[in-house]
Image (spheres, coloured by chain):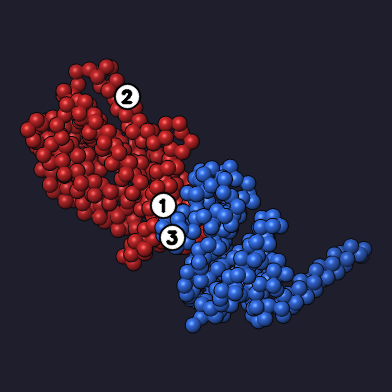
């Protein structure tokens, strides 16, 4: 049984020409006869399936649709066409820690966040000591989150996520969070997950981490899938492509500088 | 329907959000939760000053009880509507972070305000004890009246929550409209003042008003907020051994055939709730794509 099944997925965003955020602007742009929207396909015809227990990396330049794809799998976004099925408890780690409410204490936020990710308050209470322990925030859990440093917020967010007992873990660019010590710890935790046979889906610009954690990688470029194979191979080819692109940039610049 | 089943599955989230709403509203204030009681009390104090000191000799012996009883449903209604215009933009962080049925947001606003209404009721009972007002036989009628009002408030909330996610203007329009709406429901004046309004035909404008008035009065009576206010007063203040107001009192609508309007307002409330929910669900898929 596949843990993740993505079939013929297309995702279109409608971007307003200018950010229309008031009725007045909406009325004016309507009167000027502008459609108001610019269509943009963030993902084009993406299909793949993931077996339970696989660790998959998602690489590609900025704007290639990686976060959109992750958002679709987390059910935060809806595909314009195609279908996406994910089996089991999904734990998305998108924009880590931003789901916290600044006025509430760390403890209150843990319970709110965990319930959003599918835990009952009772289950959260049972894991609470471990969550606090892992985040190393024992003495500040009853202070409002607005008094935390960025690193503390991120540690707490990561800690909640990894204590949820997820079947599928979706991680968006949060591998390099926290200080050196916490990075080691979170990396170790991910490797544990992998050993336990959970499905991991990682978006990262940190190619070394992708190579280490993932067996398989998907390379996206401008919404299209370029490659979907062994992570070693994808990382090597992707690096080569980036290097080639940088060389061509350099040459154009050199060309522009030449007089004539 | 399936969305409501989904909300039930996520009731833990709903409950946590409600608790969060109750806590956050008064976080950073020294008096904290007391404000949810102090706010209406201060408002009532202003009216007491207005009607007992500046304009004395108006109304009946239990004038204050009549005012306060009508004010409760209004306070619940207006606060629910107002809160709903912020509920999506405030939760953008969790909307972008995790899936949950988005309907949880307006429902959490409704539930938080129902809880506030419950607290306000306790204050009301204390005031009644001070004013030596008996709570009366039909007090349970408050429940269906609240259900009707809650459905109406929910439908409007859902609509406004969806639109305010895309247009910041909605919030300002709503707070202004509520200021007008307050005078279009019989909180500060008895129903007969509105229903007895008459303008003789004269110039074109007066003639227009003259002909429009019967229609306006019908609409006025069909407003679920009006019906709820009248029902609260009838339920709590009228009948029983020691009625605060007598059947002939202008503050009650006994002299008007009220039931057709109750039915009409109930139909309107259910329709608004369904339409509001439909609009909200259609827009909710796009929330996470907002800036």
Left or right relative to A259: residue B59: left
Residue at position x 65%, y 74% in the image: A214
CA gap, disc 1 to disc 3? 14 Å
Residue A14: quadrant of the picture: bottom right
Residue occupying the far left of the picture: B241
The reply to whether dot 2 and dot 3 touch (C-beta < 8 Å) is no
For disc 1, the marked residue is B16
Residue occupying the far right of the picture: A259
Left or right relative to B214: residue A157: right
Task: Name the quadrant of the N terminus of chain B.
Answer: bottom left
Q: Earlier in the sequence, mark 1 or mark 2?
A: 1
Q: Is residue A256 above or below residue B106?
A: below
Whether residue B215 can be seen here: no
Q: Is residue B30 above or below residue A244?
A: above
Chain letter, blue: A
Of the two numbered discs 2 and 3 in the rendering, the one whose residue sits closer to the viewer: 3
The reply to whether dot 1 and dot 3 touch (C-beta < 8 Å) is no
């Amino acid at each position: 049984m596949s843990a993740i099944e993505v079939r013929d997925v297309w995702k279109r965003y409608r971007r307003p020409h200018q950010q229309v955020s008031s009725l007045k602007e909406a009325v004016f742009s309507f009167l000027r006869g502008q459609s108001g929207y610019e269509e943009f396909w963030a993902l084009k015809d993406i299909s793949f399936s993931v077996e339970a227990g696989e660790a998959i990396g998602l690489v590609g330049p900025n704007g290639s649709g990686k976060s959109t794809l992750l958002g679709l799998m987390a059910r935060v976004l809806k595909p314009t066409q195609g279908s996406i099925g994910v089996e089991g408890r999904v734990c998305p780690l998108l924009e880590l820690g931003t789901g916290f409410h600044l006025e509430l204490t760390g403890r209150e936020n843990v319970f709110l966040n965990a319930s959003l990710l599918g835990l009952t308050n009772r289950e959260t209470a049972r894991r609470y000591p471990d969550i606090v322990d892992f985040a190393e925030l024992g003495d500040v859990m009853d202070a409002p989150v607005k008094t935390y440093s960025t690193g503390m917020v991120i540690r707490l967010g990561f800690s909640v996520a990894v204590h949820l007992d997820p079947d599928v873990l979706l991680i968006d660019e949060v591998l390099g969070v926290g200080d050196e010590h916490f990075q080691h710890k979170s990396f170790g935790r991910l490797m544990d997950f992998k050993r336990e046979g959970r499905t991991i889906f990682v978006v990262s610009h940190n190619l070394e981490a992708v190579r280490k954690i993932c067996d398989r990688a998907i390379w996206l470029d401008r919404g299209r899938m370029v490659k979907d194979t062994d992570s070693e191979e994808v990382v090597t080819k992707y690096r080569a492509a980036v290097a080639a692109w940088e060389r061509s940039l350099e040459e154009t610049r050199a060309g522009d500088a030449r007089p004539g | 329907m399936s969305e409501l089943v989904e909300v039930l599955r996520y009731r833990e989230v709903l409950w946590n959000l409600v608790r969060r709403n109750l806590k956050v509203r008064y976080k950073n204030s020294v008096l904290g939760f007391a404000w949810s009681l102090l706010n209406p009390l201060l408002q009532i104090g202003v009216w007491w000053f207005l009607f007992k000191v500046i304009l004395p000799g108006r109304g009946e012996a239990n004038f204050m009880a009549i005012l306060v009883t009508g004010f409760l449903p209004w306070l619940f209604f207006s606060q629910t509507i107002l809160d709903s215009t912020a509920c999506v933009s405030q939760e953008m962080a969790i909307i972008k972070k995790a899936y949950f049925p988005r309907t949880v947001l307006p429902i959490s606003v409704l539930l938080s305000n129902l809880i506030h209404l419950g607290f306000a009721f306790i204050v009301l009972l204390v005031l009644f004890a001070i004013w030596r007002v008996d709570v009366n036989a039909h007090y349970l009628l408050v429940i269906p009246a609240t259900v009707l009002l809650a459905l109406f408030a929910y439908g409007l909330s859902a609509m406004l929550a969806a639109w305010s996610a895309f247009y910041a203007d909605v919030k300002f329009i709503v707070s202004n409209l509520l200021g007008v709406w307050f005078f279009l429901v019989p909180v500060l004046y008895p129903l007969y003042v509105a229903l007895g309004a008459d303008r003789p035909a004269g110039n074109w404008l007066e003639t227009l008003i003259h002909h429009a008035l019967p229609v306006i009065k019908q609409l006025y009576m069909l407003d679920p907020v009006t019906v709820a206010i009248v029902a609260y007063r009838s339920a709590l203040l009228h009948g029983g051994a020691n009625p605060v107001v007598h059947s002939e009192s202008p503050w009650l609508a006994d002299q008007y055939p009220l039931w057709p309007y109750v039915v009409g307002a109930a139909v309107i409330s259910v329709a608004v709730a369904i339409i509001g929910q439909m609009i909200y669900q259609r827009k909710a898929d796009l929330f996470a794509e907002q800036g």
